Amino acid sequence: MALRDIFKFRELPESETSKPFLEHLEDLRWTIVKMAITLIVAMILCFAFRGTLVRIMQAPLHEIDQNLGVLRALGITDSIVVSFHLAFYAGIVISFPLLLFFTAEFVLPALTLMEKKILFPAIGVSFALFLTGVLVCYFWLLPKTILFFFHDTESLGWAPAWTVQQYYSFVTRFTLGFGLSFELPVVVLVLVRFGLITYEFMARTRPYAIVLTFRPRFRFRSRASRARSSQIRRRREFPC
């Protein structure tokens, strides 16, 4: 298969009648194959630079406490297992534009002319939102979250000793989940376009959405404040 065939959009049917079901299945099969190959290549590339990825992912730990930068590997195969998991999640981030492209390549024949015009700008906006969410989480939210759990653990009189498996499982899923949450505007536009939700429905449920959005934030802040206060009191009672 030539390279131009990989990035070639599905051909429109010669007649206005829909394509046979088996031809749609064949197109779907090749779409899945191309997405899988793209993700595997991205994973191999990320696995080759796993040392750099490890240093990047552990950077928030060093900002809190130098001792936390040394994670504990409790399993014999932790170095390989964690590296594969890290390469998989990093490969998703790197190959995300191509994954969106191949998805658009499959659905393009079913779109109207207006939808085809906004398809590629939508892909660009989707990737920009996803990347923005990942970066915001990594540089702002993730350090604050780790610091909160660090102080919360110390407030209970425990010594934070996190393992490699636990740390990377939490960080990768938390970061990717936050990046996907930034896709909400695109999801809402798609749902509105297909008539699944309306402006009136969103306006009617807006107060509930605001409460659900900010309630966990207030709870998080209150728990963080209690943890810091407990730590300050303990230091005053037992000065070094």
Image (cartoon, grey):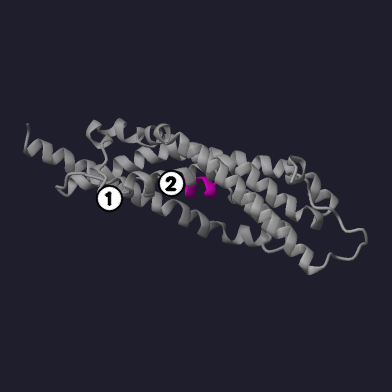
Amino acid of disc 1: Gly
Give the percent coordinates (x, y) of residue 104: 72, 50
Disc number at residue 2? none
Q: Nearer the viewer, residue 119 or 226?
A: 119
Marked residue nearer the N-terminal end (1 or 2): 1
Q: Say left or right for 240 vs 71.
A: left
Q: Is the stretch drawn in magenta largely helix, strand or loop? A: helix
Residue 140: image quadrant is: top left
Magenta-highlighted residues: 174-182
Q: Position of residue 122 (x, y in %)?
A: 70, 44
Give the vertical position of 103 relative to 48 (above or below): below
The residue that disc 1 covers is: 75
- Say which residue label 2 marks: 84
Seen at 18% across and 46% down, the residue is 155
* Residue furthest out toward the bottom: 21
Q: Quadrant of residue 26?
A: bottom right
